Amino acid sequence: MTSEAPIRPQLAVSASIFRDGKVLLIQRAHPPAQGSWSVPGGRVEFGEPLHVALAREVMEETRLEIEILGMAGWREVLPTTSGAGKHFVVMSFAARWVAGEPVLNGECSDFAWLPPDALGERPLTPGLQEIIDAAYRLSRA
């Protein structure tokens, strides 16, 4: 059985989760972006509302309960010119931590709660700093 690449972009969601003035970063354990730091998120299932998909993905990856504050922006992840990878449109949200402590699933290899303006030298997924900045402004409103 062969696996064909999708012919359309796939919809995904992500959450910049804030707790005590810090944002949760997770390190990706697998491609794409293996080793890069990002925020929790993933694909939206057919017929699934965005807010439900976001809460589900955050719970699956981190075991955290969140309150969604609003949409912070969007990003695109495009396939490489060689045709490798997939095309994702990621709807990014600001969220507030409600309960739980991070317990990572196999998609994530590490996590850190960091000040949004001091993420250090970690390799971030493209466009992440801008999304975190927008989400931080929403979280302070």
Image: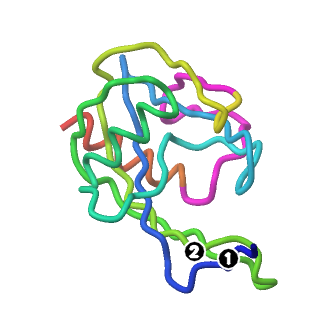
Q: Nearer the viewer, residue 41 or 113?
A: 41
Q: Is 71 left, or right, of 17 in this rendering?
A: left
Q: Secondary structure at mark 1?
A: loop
Find residue 100 and name its label: none
Q: Residue at x 27, y 46 (%)?
A: 52
Res 87 label:
2
The residue sitting at the front extreme is 1
Q: Main secondary structure of the magenta part?
A: loop
Is residue 58 depicted above or below 93 in this figure?
above
Residue at disc 2, secondary structure: loop
- N-term mark: 2 or 1: 1
Q: Is residue 123 magenta?
A: yes
The amino acid type, in three-letter code, at marker 2 is His
How far across and how far down the image is residue 126, in percent? 62, 59
User: Which numbered tag is attached to residue 79?
Assistant: 1
Seen at 57% across and 74% down, the residue is: 87
> Which amino acid, mark 1?
Pro
User: Where does residue 55 sit, x and y in percent of width and height?
Assistant: 33, 38
Q: Which image quadrant: the N terminus? A: bottom right
> Do the CB atoms of the residues marked 2 and 1 lie less than 8 Å apart?
yes
Start-end of magenta stretch: 110-127
At horizontal 74% and vertical 53% (from top left) the residue drawn is 31
The picture places residue 120, in percent across and down from the top left corner, at: 67, 33
Q: Position of residue 108 (x, y in %)?
A: 65, 34
